[in-house]
Image (tube, rainbow, N blue to C red):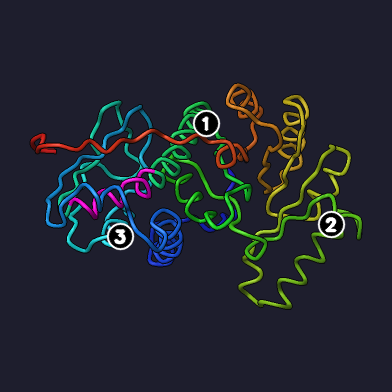
Amino acid sequence: MLMAKEFHQTLWDDDLRAQWQEILRLAIREDLGQRGDWTTAALVPEDAPGRATIVARQPGTLAGEPAVADTLHALDSRLEWRPAARDSQPLARGQAIGRIEGPARGLLAAERVLLNFLGRLSGIATLVRRYVDAVSGTRARIYDTRKTTPGWRRLEKYAVRCGGGWNHRTGLFDAVLIKDNHLAFGSAAEAVARARKFLADRFGQAGCQAIVEVELDALEPLEAVLAAGPDLILLDNMSPHELGEAVRHRDACGAAVELEASGGIELATVRRIAETGVERISVGALTHSAGALDFGLDWGPDPGPI
């Protein structure tokens, strides 16, 4: 098993929580505006208590639970969240993920913001889990891309981790990925050397630890690029036969370079690609094409222990 460098992996930490709170302020503003919830103000007494359970309407994988309490408190600090499930946990249809208790007006104001957030992140985690399961037993790992919702990138990458996937680079600032447009300024092998020099000159020893990856859309330059010593080679839009040839050539020359397949990969084809022997498979669809997982807020009396 090759031991290549790894990209930064996203966790639910203080930085990610702060990013969610920025998005939360926007979400509340677009839902309540400056005038608040007219329906609730008209129909619900100011001092009415509320109790509701968040329930998964379909099976999937949970992502986003750590944000629930912050979301509730942003609407009313008296709202209490009692979780019954944690991120990365598989969910059955009808399963409760937690209960909310507190002022009814605040609870109703939080409903759509909360369900939209959980639905989006859990939908990504659910799709990722399908891809991860599809390549089980091979050495391939499933990676995301930068094809994310503007402003939501790290949150969506967190959801990928909840589904069992891996994060590719977060942005242009944390790895070198030499693509075809960059190669208008020199060969792939030359580009690797220039990237290494840039990183060392700019960042010293830390720069030497940064990942340098090269994208190839044909096999002809593979030998020269392997000799240049990148950390990773991305094989773009290649057939399973071509991917297998790349793996065999890499193995034959003993290069300590992991190979990544990318381009048009779907759930129906990912197993065949993984069986070629590549170590990494990056899939833009994990974030740009994931549907929302359906959650509901079931209002009513205490359903019993969660």
Query: Counting residues from the N terminus, which is met first, the one under dot 3 or under dot 2?
Result: 3
Q: Is residue 46 above or below residue 164?
A: below
Q: Which residues are magenta?
A: 104-115
On screen, residue 42 versus residue 149, left or right, reads left
Q: Position of residue 34 (x, y in %)?
A: 40, 63
- The mark found on residue 70 in the picture is 3
State the residue at coordinates (49%, 42%): 165
- The mark found on residue 131 in the picture is 1
Q: Which residue is under mark 2?
A: 182
Q: Position of residue 202 (x, y in %)?
A: 71, 77
Q: Is residue 95 above or below residue 6?
A: above
At label 3, the amino acid type is Asp
Q: Main secondary structure of the magenta part?
A: helix
Cα gap from disc 1 to disc 2, whole angstroms: 30 Å
Element type at marker 1? helix
The residue lying toward the viewer, choosing from 209 and 84, is 84
- Within 10 Å of disc 1 (Cα), the crowding (few <14, some 14-19, many 20+) is many
